[in-house]
Image (spheres, helix red, strand yellow):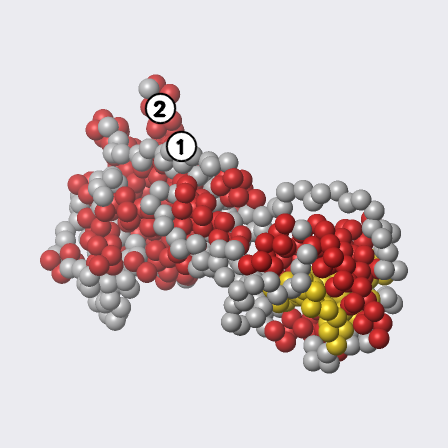
Amino acid sequence: MKIVISSGHGKYISGAVGPSPWGLHEHTEAVKVVNQAAAVMESMGVDVVAYEDTVSKSVNENLDRICNFHNAQGKHDLDVSVHFNSTDPQPTGPVGSEVFYTSSTGQKVAKATVDKICAASGLKNRGPKPTDSLAFLNNTNAPAVLVEVCFVNSHPDVDIYHDRFSEICTAIAEGLTGEQAGPQPEPGPEEPPTLRKGDVGPWVTELQDDLNSQLAGCSLDNDGDFGSKTDSAVRDYQRTRGLDADGIVGPNTWAALDGNAPPVPEPVIPGELPVEQQEDVRDIAETSDIAKYSWKDRGVAPAGYIQGMALAFATSYNRLKAGDSIGIEMAKANTGNSDYDALSWYAGVFNSMGMSNETAGPDTLRHLYVLLLGLGMRESSGKHCEGRDMSATNTTSDTCEAGLFQTSYNAHSCSDEFDKLFDQACSGKSPCYLETFKQGVSCSSSSWSCYGSGNGFKFQELCKSCPTFAAETCAITLRNLRKHYGPINERAAEIKTQADQMFLQIQEYLDEMEAIA
């Protein structure tokens, strides 16, 4: 005997949803019933093919996909679709189970199945129901039945379903096959599904409960709807537990929630270097070959630019060594996505100069700063106070460019690490080294002018007054939104090995100082 059985609706076509927090989510529960009933039938020696639609985005596509799957399974004895029903208004008492059919063979199977379900569970028996209006029954080739296990918005039905789940699944298997099932092992603990923004149902409610109890300051509505607020809370939770803050609740996030994982202490934010080390780093920069280099169409950089960028690199390198996520993000390996990652876009240039970025770590961070150094000369000629391009019309606070690299605040959406840098700078926790960057640079009052209000205005101010912040936000943007910068898109920012030699010397110096300490 061969049976093809599928869960009604699909991953993106939820079907009926009962009231939170106790109501059922039709598709989620149908998948569970299909999997368990199929396992019982397999134990009876039945050839079973189970299916869930995880692709369709519309009702019509979903119905066509399910029917086409059933019809593509070769010769078989029965097509089965598992659903859960709903009624409006919400019932106050039990409603029950029913099974729909169209053919005479389907009628026999439908009666046997609904009788078995109700006898095993105590659900009210609504009987076998003939119909010619259901697409599944009309468009599958084998005799077919559509099982409505119970009602998602009947509290008595839902209670019985949870209490007698195994018995219901075994009854479905026996009703469909006309045979007796042997003793069945109790199903193990249910594995939580992977959740993300847009999902709904009881697992989302459980997620919201866990977040409310474990994430400081979290007060989500327990509505079973994975919306923007839940997404933000999930990312905050992941970030504070040392997980990838991608908003996707998979096995690692569930494990942390189940284990009530404590927050991971934030890495110490590197502060300013000791004065003596600052002087040593500036000396390395001042005597480097790159300090004497005449940049194409720009000439020799201001002394403060080369020395300031040396100190900015030291800040980012110390972040990386401390395990700070900002440093890790800058120093990640070439992503291979040249549409977003400047190191991928420039891979041919770097590789031709023996500067591979295929491995995450200090080398890649250093090479990123080599690119930064060239970009700053193209965008501002090394002037930390550079104002917006006066020929441009982007004068809103979020789009107005500012500082060494002419970054605008609207780039912040490219990475959570950008916002993290912004928060640190706003709270005065970021080294700035303004006095160093100022050397050899004159700033007019118009250069210092900023535009708009809010975070965009504050970002412009910080880029000019805290050049290290400007360098690090540019570094994050280069790794995640390289099209933000015209000279990068044109590959006009120069890559110089002399710059890499300077940054390597600083890296080795900092390592030596750490070893001595």
**Residue 448 in the image: x percent, y percent?**
15, 56
Q: Quadrant of the C terminus?
A: top left
Vertical side of 80 occupied by 171: above or below:
above
**Residue at the location (33% across, 23% down)?**
513
| Badge 2 density bin: few <14, some 14–19, many ≥20, Cα 10 Å | few
Is 229 displayed left or right of 355 in the figure? left
Q: Where does label 2 land, which residue? A: 514
**Residue 387 in the image: x percent, y percent?**
21, 59
**Residue 368 in the image: x percent, y percent?**
41, 45
| Badge 1 density bin: few <14, some 14–19, many ≥20, Cα 10 Å | some
Secondary element type, mark 2: helix
Task: State whether residue 300 appears in this view.
Answer: no
Residue at the farthest bottom position: 132
Instruction: Count every numbered label the image shows and give the total.
Output: 2
Q: Where does label 1 land, which residue? A: 321
**Do tag 1 and tag 2 residues touch (Cβ < 8 Å)?**
yes
Alpha carbon of mark 1 to alpha carbon of mark 2: how far? 10 Å
Identify the amino acid type marked 1: Lys
**Residue at the location (57% across, 44% down)?**
251
Q: Quadrant of the N terminus?
A: bottom right
Q: Earlier in the sequence, mark 1 or mark 2?
A: 1
Task: State whether residue 229 appears in this view.
Answer: yes
Is 510 displayed left or right of 88 in the figure? left
Q: Nearer the viewer, residue 267 or 113?
A: 113
Is 454 displayed left or right of 367 in the figure? left
Identify the amino acid type marked 2: Glu
The circle on residue 393 is: none
Vertical side of 373 occupied by 74: above or below:
below
Q: Nearer the viewer, residue 384 or 301?
A: 384
Q: Nearer the viewer, residue 184 or 375?
A: 184
